[in-house]
Image: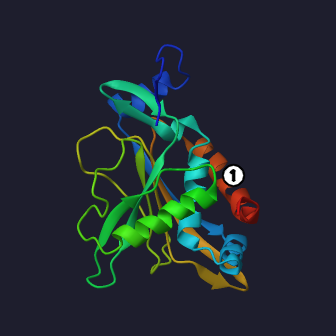
Amino acid sequence: MIFTSIDLQSWPRRQVFYYFSKMAPTGYSMTVKLDVTALWKTTHQKGVKFFPAYLWLVTKNLNRQVEFKVAEKDGVLGYYNELTPLYASFHEDDHTFSLMWVPYSEQFSDFNRQYLENQRLYRDHHGVLAVPHTPPDNAYTVSCVPWIGFEHFAVHSYENKLYYFPSVEAGKVIERDGRFWMPLSLTCHHATTDGWHISRFLEDLKSDMVHFECYL
């Protein structure tokens, strides 16, 4: 995990960042419906769990853009070289959840292996954190509400601290006319990202979902 400081004098977003973080702190949320037919069929045909594939693909494509990785560390504004997915693991016995995380890997096989190992070791650990140590500084929230096919979903933090990472939430995958559709909600800080960054992320994500088999 590498943190690189941002030169505010030469940063193209300097004025936009100041405006939306200091003068008019603003976040935004949007929900889109993704055609996940190819990914859904590939994971089922290859015996791969859909959820870790979703975690990896979302993280892979967020990591392509510096703006999604901006953070403040020790009073210095900068960005991490990559994000780590912090996700919820559901407990069937008492209907609660606990948080886990898996370091991102460029190889899905490595990421998936660690995800499955986490499930084996910690899936029965209750409490806010299933893993017996705190999440890394580059952890961002990404999860799924698999029981609900929502039209919109927004996550807002009410804690008074600086947080610029995106939050991503998926909903129930629904089959319609032979296609599989999944709602995907993104909540972002306007100081670091605009609609253009979201559009790039979504187009790259869609492409990777269609061609997921090449990553297996």
The quadrant where residue 121 appears: bottom left
Q: Which amino acid type is shown beneath numbered disc 1? A: Asp
Q: Which residue is mark 1?
A: 204
Instruction: Using a 10 Å C-alpha cutoff, classify the residue at mark 1 as few (fewer than 14 neighbours), some (14 to 19) or many (20 or more).
Output: some
What residue appears at the point 56 percent right and 63 percent down from the top-left corner? 112
Q: Nearer the viewer, residue 81 or 147?
A: 81
Residue 139 position (above or below residue 117): above
The total of numbered circles placed on residues is 1
Q: Is 138 on the left or on the right of 203, as rendered?
A: left
Q: Is 65 on the left or on the right of 21, as rendered?
A: right
Q: Is residue 21 visible?
A: yes
Image location of residue 134, percent across then percent down = 29, 50
Image location of residue 72, percent across then percent down = 36, 31
Q: Is residue 152 visible?
A: no
What residue appears at the point 37 percent right and 61 percent down from the top-left corner? 100
Q: Nearer the viewer, residue 86 or 157?
A: 86
What residue appears at the point 67 percent right and 84 percent down from the top-left corner? 176
Image location of residue 116, percent across then percent down = 49, 68
The quadrant where residue 154 appears: bottom left
